[in-house]
Each structure stands twice: as C-alpha cells, then as structure tokens.
Image: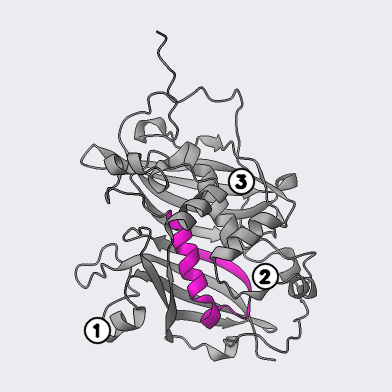
C-alpha cells in the first residue's frame, strides 16, 4: 500500500533565515459580504469605516475597509508560512494603515524575516517578521511587524515552495494617514453621533468601558476562517486536545484584539477619522469560547494639528471581570505584563497602544 502524503505548513526555528521573504499563497478579493460579516461581530463606532456618506464627505471614494479587518487578513495570511507551528504570538509592533482599501480590491501579503533568536533552553526561539498586505497595483494597505515563539527544529513534510524568488519592497517611512487625510480636508456635518471629541480627552484620563462581549464558539471559528487563519489551534478540537495549553480550541488573538478595541470605540473613537497606528501589543493570556471580554483605555498623549487632533491610548482587554472592578481593587492594568515583578493581572488578555486622528468639537 502506498503511504499517503501528509503535508505540514508553517515553519520551525531552523527553517527561518534572516532576510528571507515569503510570498503567502492567499489571494483574496475583499467584498461587501466580507465587510458585513466582519461588522456583524464587532460593534465598532468609528463612522468612517461604517458610512459611505461620511467617508465620501472626507474625500474617500467609498467606505474604506476597516483597518482591523486588514490587520487580521495580514496576520492570518502569514500563518501559512510563519506561525502555523508556533507556540504563541508574542507581539504586535508598528502597525500602520497608509492607504485605504475598498470592497472589490484584491489583497495579498508577504513577510520578511527580520530576526531569529534561539532561546537559551534550546527547545524554542523567537522569530521577528515584517508583513506587508498589498492591494492591486502593489499599494500597501497594512504594514506591521510581529514576533512569534516557535519550536526548535525543522518542519517535516512541508511541500516544495513555488519556483519564485519573492521580494518585499523597502518602503522607507510609511505614512500614518491615507492620502485623503494628508492635506486639508472637510469635516462632515452630523446631527447625531457619539461623544469623545479631541477636546474631551486629557492626558491621564482612564475609561473603564462597561459593556462586555461574550465570545461564541461558532462565531470565533467562523471569523477565523473568514480571515484565512490556518492554525488548527483555533478550530481543530482533536489537535487542540493534544497541543493546546488549554486542551481545547483557543480564540485567535487578532479577533480578541479587534473585539477589545471595538468595545472601547463608543467612548474613544466615535469621532475618529483614521487609525494612525498600533504598537507595543501583546497577549498576556489566552481566550476560550464562552469567555467574556471587557476593555479599558488610558490617554497617554494628545497633539493638536489644527483642523483635527491626534490622541494616543493604551488599551487593555480583560476576561470574565469588568475592568472597573479590577481598577477599584487597585489592579495595575496599564503597565505591560511582560517584565512585571509584581502586580500581574491574570485576567488581562490583550494590551496595545493605539493612536488615532480625532475630529474636533464642531
């Protein structure tokens, strides 16, 4: 009897070489259906990503695809080549959205290995990559770096790579605003809308966002498939019983990040014009189906730019307890968990710095 072929994807530590570029095989046209399914899972208040009329009034040709969907596509496309064997996703670094993406655009991604660092234990190591998500004509719609913890060794059974020599463009300084917002632009008039204009935020302000989000079992798997994340840890129960720290499926971290930022949106980004960047992000602990997420935000800085302002928040997500309850008990929510000598917050599931352009009060 002929032995069946068993293909495996992703890479282990010895498969990575600094400087290599991987052209990820996913080639996906973002359509209105994808936007609708994504929106159905995220109660996001940012108007420019939800309203065609509002976006056009700002100078966009249509409603742009939500940057968090773009980040999830870029992260997930890279799993096939970078992290399908990974133990953990360690960090989000310097995430930017320099160009708008619209329904009908086709997106692809590449990742370049920036560094490979074996652990002193010898059984694992950290891989640092830069991923670019590009639409038609090669324009970058999402750029980010990330770090993943991967086991030592090589993947056995990985199919031969296509006979190409992938490259990744060196972009120099990547803009933080899309073209319609880089020059002066009109601000749409609105009769309704959310609070939280630029003038309403002060450095040091803390928001405990009260409404939570319980993660559904089928929901998190459907959303993982939607963005093409192929790590079986998120949807294969038999694999997870053997390989998961929780002995069951673990919710994909990009979704956790997106849900938490959406939970914060009515209080902080209901008047945002664009996401200017995410940085210093991590997942201190995992989330399972059935867990309930809550969020809190702290204003780190603000900058007046004339017609609008820039506000930087530190946003954290916790599970199964409101952030307000933790803060009332004196929990140190806004100090990064990595490197803490005391005061660890075991309930914290995500933390990240988010910078947004925010409109001023009319």
| CA distance separating discs 1 and 2 | 37 Å
Furthest-top residue in view?
1
Quadrant where the N terminus sits is top left
257 is higher (above) or lower (below) than 47 = above
**Circle 2 sits in a helix, a strand or a loop, which is it?**
loop
Q: Which mark is residue 170?
A: 3
Q: Can you tell which quarter of the image residue 123 is in?
A: top left
Q: Can you tell which quarter of the image residue 191 is in?
A: bottom right
| CA distance separating discs 3 and 2 | 32 Å
Q: Earlier in the sequence, mark 3 or mark 2?
A: 2
Residue at image x 68%, y 55%?
A: 33
Residue stretch in magenta: 252-278
Q: Is residue 96 visible to the viewer in this orientation of the structure?
A: no
Mark 2, residue position: 50
**Contact, mark 3 vs mark 2 (Cβ under 8 Å):** no
Q: Earlier in the sequence, mark 1 or mark 2?
A: 2
Q: Earlier in the sequence, mark 3 or mark 1?
A: 3
Q: Is residue 358 visible to the viewer in this orientation of the structure?
A: yes
Residue at image x 54%, y 54%?
A: 72
Q: Which mark is residue 267?
A: none
Q: Point out residue 358 in the picture as x, y percentages from the top left corner.
A: 62, 79
Quadrant where the C terminus sits is bottom right
Horizontally, residue 221 falls left or right of residue 70, namely left
Q: Which mark is residue 329?
A: 1
Q: Point out residue 109 in the picture as x, y percentages from the top left corner.
A: 60, 44
């Amino acid at each position: 009897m002929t032995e069946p072929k068993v293909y495996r994807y992703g890479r282990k530590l010895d498969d990575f070489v600094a400087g290599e570029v991987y052209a990820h095989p996913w080639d996906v046209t973002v359509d209105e259906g994808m936007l609708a399914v994504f929106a159905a899972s995220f109660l996001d208040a940012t108007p420019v990503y939800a309203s065609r009329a509002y976006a056009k009034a700002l100078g966009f040709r249509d409603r742009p695809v939500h940057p968090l969907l773009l980040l999830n596509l870029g992260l997930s496309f890279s799993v096939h080549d970078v992290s399908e064997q990974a133990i953990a996703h360690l960090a989000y670094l310097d995430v930017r959205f320099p160009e708008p993406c619209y329904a009908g655009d086709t997106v692809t991604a590449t990742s370049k290995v920036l560094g490979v660092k074996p652990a002193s234990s010898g059984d694992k190591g950290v891989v640092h990559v830069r991923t670019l998500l590009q639409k038609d004509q090669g324009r970058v719609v999402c750029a980010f770096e990330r770090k993943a913890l991967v086991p030592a060794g090589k993947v056995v059974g990985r199919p031969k790579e296509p006979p190409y020599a992938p490259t990744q463009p060196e972009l120099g300084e990547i803009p933080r605003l899309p073209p319609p917002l880089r020059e002066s632009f009109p601000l749409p008039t609105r009769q309704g809308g959310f609070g939280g204009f630029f003038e309403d935020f002060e450095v040091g302000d803390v928001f405990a966002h009260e409404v939570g989000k319980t993660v559904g079992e089928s929901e998190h798997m459907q959303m993982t498939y939607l963005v093409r994340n192929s790590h079986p840890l998120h949807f294969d129960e038999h694999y997870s019983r053997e390989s998961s720290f929780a002995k069951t499926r673990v919710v994909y971290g990009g979704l956790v990040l997106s849900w938490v930022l959406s939970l914060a949106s009515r209080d902080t980004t209901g008047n945002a014009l664009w996401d200017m960047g995410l940085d210093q992000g991590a997942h201190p602990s995992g989330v399972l189906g059935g867990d309930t997420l809550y969020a809190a935000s702290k204003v780190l800085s603000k900058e007046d730019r004339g017609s609008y302002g820039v506000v930087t928040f530190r946003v954290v997500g916790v599970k199964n307890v409101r952030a307000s309850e933790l803060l009332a008990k004196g929990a140190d929510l806004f100090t990064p968990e990595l490197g803490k000598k005391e005061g660890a917050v075991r309930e914290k599931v995500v933390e990240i710095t988010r910078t947004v352009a925010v409109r001023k009060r009319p």
